[in-house]
Image (cartoon, rainbow, N blue to C red):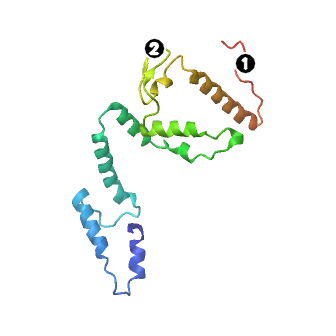
């Protein structure tokens, strides 16, 4: 509304039907909550939205009780953290997640329970969120994720027309 205010005034100049009481009431409420407005309203809506959003973010952050909740909130609210949800599932480019991968990805993002607490074969206790698997040296998934990432990079390089060899023997 703020960005088109001058256009609205021009269109409705000859019309006696609208004095925009709603806008004035809203601007008055905004000023009492967040401070005085400039004489000319900025043409972008985020100017009016941002102060309220910052108050909401501060309220949510203050309600978090553990460091894990705070870490999850900060990770989820960081720029581009949800971009993977917008990726096209292209099977030919190995860009398709199975249902279990989506379940785990969404569960990690929301801090949900992913497994039953148990003892890992390395001896450590695994909590219900299952985060231990990301750091366990004996986790079978580490090798699989490593090889899957290598395969994805090799496929991208080959599809660009460049010859490549994945981890040639004798590197280490």
| Left-right relation of 51 to 140 | left
Q: Position of residue 135 (x, y in %)?
A: 48, 22
Q: Secondary structure at mark 2?
A: loop
The tally of labels here is 2
**Coordinates of residue 70 in the picture (x, y in percent):** 35, 36
Residue at 54% from the left image edge and 45% from the top image edge: 85
Q: What's the residue at 41%, 80% (across, down)?
A: 10
Q: Is residue 97 left or right of residue 30?
A: right
Quarter of the image where one finds residue 49: bottom left
Which mark, residue 168? 1
Looking at marks 1 and 2 on the same chain, the residue that comes earlier in the sequence is marked by 2
**In the picture shown, does residue 169 fall above or below 109?**
above
Helix, strand or loop at mark 1: loop
Image x and y of residue 22, in percent? 30, 73
Residue that badge 2 annotates: 123
Residue pictured at 33% horizontal, 46% vertical: 57
């Amino acid at each position: 509304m703020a960005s088109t205010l001058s256009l609205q005034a021009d269109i409705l100049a000859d019309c006696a039907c609208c004095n925009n009481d709603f806008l004035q009431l809203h601007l008055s409420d905004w000023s009492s909550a967040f401070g005085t407005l400039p004489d000319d309203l900025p043409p972008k809506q985020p100017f009016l939205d941002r102060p309220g959003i910052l108050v909401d973010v501060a309220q949510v952050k203050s309600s978090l009780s553990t460091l894990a909740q705070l870490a999850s909130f900060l990770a989820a609210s960081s720029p581009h953290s949800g971009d993977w949800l917008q990726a096209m599932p292209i099977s030919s480019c190995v860009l398709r997640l199975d249902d279990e991968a989506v379940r785990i990805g969404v569960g990690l993002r929301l801090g949900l329970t992913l497994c039953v607490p148990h003892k890992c074969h390395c001896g450590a206790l695994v909590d219900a969120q299952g985060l231990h698997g990301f750091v366990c040296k004996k986790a079978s998934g580490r090798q699989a994720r490593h090889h899957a990432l290598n395969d994805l990079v090799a496929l991208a390089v080959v599809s660009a027309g460049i010859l490549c060899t994945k981890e040639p023997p004798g590197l280490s």
